[in-house]
Image (cartoon, grey):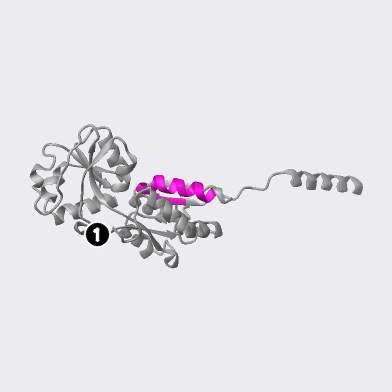
Amino acid sequence: MRALRLVAASLVLAAAAVLPARAAPPVVVFAAASLTNAFEEIGRAWTALGHRVPKFSFAASSTLAKQIEQGAPAGIFASADEAWMDYLAARKLVEADSRRDLASNSLVVVVPADRPATVALDASTDFSKFFAGQRIATGDPAHVPVGRYAEQALRNLGGWDAVAPRLVRAESVRAALAFVERGEVGAGIVYSTDAAISSKVKVAGAFPARSHNAIVYPIAAVAGRADDEARALLAFLAGPEARAILRRHGFTDPKVQ
């Protein structure tokens, strides 16, 4: 009987030796929609170094911050504005000492590529004639960062009252871009990096940097969710190789516009 038990134990050990070890879960990164293309390339560069493939979830910063607040298992959060990072920081849902500014961006007006136009965007602009009779898409200013920047710019240039009734308030900057790509609106207000990825739109004008808050992308580890792999990826995202990729996608260095 003892011999049989020894044989059985040996078989169990042998089987365990040939079974693959349970794979560690991927690092989950919640990132602003405008970072999609750049982060996907950064993810490939990270994986090429022998690391686990990260899992990205892209959406409006507001949506992602609320999901983290509700317990979503993200290890890293990258926001398109400081406000939503501050929202999580105030609730102690991100690690304060891990936070850093990743990149900056600029704000532009885009139009369908088959309807090119040029618009001036300054204090002398007559916004009553700004794509008159047409709808203009941007992120919902109530919670989407690009929409907040758009509202700031339009208010500072005296155009908010004329434009606000015609706004299509999209759930993210990429959704606003899609409205323009499909020709469903006359124009859209998006980031310059989003305009650059689409052959279906043309830039009609750029808002002066001084007309809105600096477009800053902060990144941080999510409190209680970041393991060693997540911290290493966070450092890589803020490092020189990732910075070079962000620049290739049109982002500028933090707070430099």
Can residue 172 be seen here? no
Along the horizontal axis of the image, is 40 left or right of 251? Answer: right
Judge whether 238 appears above or below 250 on screen: below
Tag 1: residue type?
Asn
Along the horizontal axis of the image, is 126 left or right of 211? Answer: left
Q: Closer to the camera, 251 or 59?
A: 251
- Residue 131 screen position, x and y as percent: 13, 40
Label 1: which secondary element? loop
- Residue 101 screen position, x and y as percent: 37, 61
Along the horizontal axis of the image, is 85 left or right of 168? Answer: right
In the image, the segment drawn in magenta is 29-47
Q: Determine which quarter of the picture holds residue 137.
A: top left
Count of picture labels: 1
Q: Disc 1 designates what residue?
A: 213
Asked if residue 4 lies in the magenta stretch, the reply is no
- Residue 43 screen position, x and y as percent: 48, 48
Q: Closer to the camera, 96 or 247?
A: 247
Q: Closer to the camera, 64 or 206?
A: 206
> Which residue lies most toward the bottom here?
97
Can residue 90 be seen here? yes
Residue at the image point whose x is 28% and y is 40% from the top: 177
Q: Main secondary structure of the magenta part?
A: helix
Quarter of the rendering occupied by the C terminus: bottom left
Along the horizontal axis of the image, is 3 left or right of 109? Answer: right
Residue at the image point whose x is 32% and y is 38% from the top: 198
